[in-house]
Structures are given as structure tokens and as C-alpha cells.
């Protein structure tokens, strides 16, 4: 199983596309490379907002397989810095589609909190 370049992963998270990029060096170098490939900061911001309007996640979710060999701390720190540079500091996630409450959840909702009721 091959390890995907950190730059390619970041580009995919930002654009949804697998782009041919050199290995990651700096946030600015990545943004410059994306700009040369047609993904200017404005285009990335518009893409993020379009996904929000259609109730889709942004940054694009990554699979476990894609993230093999990537430090979660490095990933989130880098993605957070880049998003801040783009003025996109907030996760754009689709609303939850879950509306049903299962039997255990209904039972818990019906119970009074432990500090209510009779003591001893």
C-alpha cells in the first residue's frame, strides 16, 4: 500500500481533487502550487461555501487508508493554519441526518436526572 504525499492529501481536503503536487514544504508554497493549478484562495473559499450551501462537508473528509503514515497532530495543525490563511476558520459540516431516537435513548430521556427525586 503506497503512502500519499502530504501535499496531495491537503489539496484533496481543500479542493476535493487529487492534484499533482510536490512534497509539502510550507503552507504558502502549497497555496502557491494550488493557485498555479487553478485553485486560487478565492476559488477554494467559493468551493467551501458552495459545499456548505449544499449541506456537504468541507474540508473534504479523508479515509483511514488515505491517512496512513500521517501524524494526526501535524495534519490538523497544518490544515488549521491553511484554513486560517484562507479566512475559513470554521468547519463546514453537513447537518446531521439522524432524527430517530432508539429505545435506550428514549428511556434515558424519560428518566429524571439523578439529583431529582427522593433522597434516602
Image: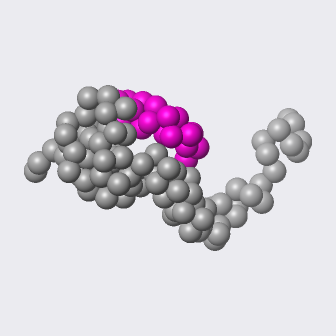
Percent coordinates x, y for residue 45 in the rendering: 52, 51
Direction from residue 102 to residue 58 in the image, left or right? left
Farthest right residue in view: 118
- Of residues 80 and 106, which is closer to you in this image? 80
Image x and y of residue 99, in percent: 64, 69
- The quadrant the C terminus occupies is top right
Q: Residue at x 37, y 32 (%)?
A: 28
**Percent from the top left, x then y, of residue 90?**
58, 43
Q: Quadrant of residue 5?
A: top left
Image coordinates of residue 94 in percent, x first then y, are 56, 61
At x 56%, y 68%, the residue is: 54
**Lateral position of residue 83 relative to residue 99, left or right:** left
Instruction: Choose between 17 and 35: the one closer to the eye.
Output: 35
Which portion, as a residue range, is magenta?
72-91
Q: Residue sitting at 56 percent across and 53 percent down? A: 92
* Residue 94 at least partly seen: no
Can residue 50 be found in the magenta stretch? no
Amino acid at each position: 500500500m503506497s503512502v500519499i504525499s502530504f501535499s496531495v492529501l491537503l489539496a484533496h481536503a481543500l479542493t476535493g481533487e487529487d492534484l499533482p503536487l510536490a512534497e509539502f514544504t510550507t503552507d504558502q508554497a502549497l497555496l502557491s502550487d494550488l493557485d498555479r493549478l487553478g485553485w486560487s484562495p478565492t476559488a477554494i473559499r467559493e468551493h467551501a461555501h458552495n459545499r456548505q450551501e449544499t449541506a456537504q462537508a468541507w474540508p473534504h473528509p479523508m479515509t483511514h487508508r488515505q491517512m496512513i503514515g500521517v501524524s494526526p497532530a501535524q495534519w490538523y495543525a497544518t490544515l488549521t493554519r491553511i484554513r486560517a490563511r484562507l479566512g475559513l476558520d470554521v468547519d463546514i459540516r453537513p447537518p446531521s441526518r439522524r432524527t430517530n431516537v432508539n429505545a435506550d435513548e428514549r428511556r434515558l430521556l424519560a428518566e429524571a436526572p439523578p439529583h431529582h427525586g427522593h433522597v434516602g
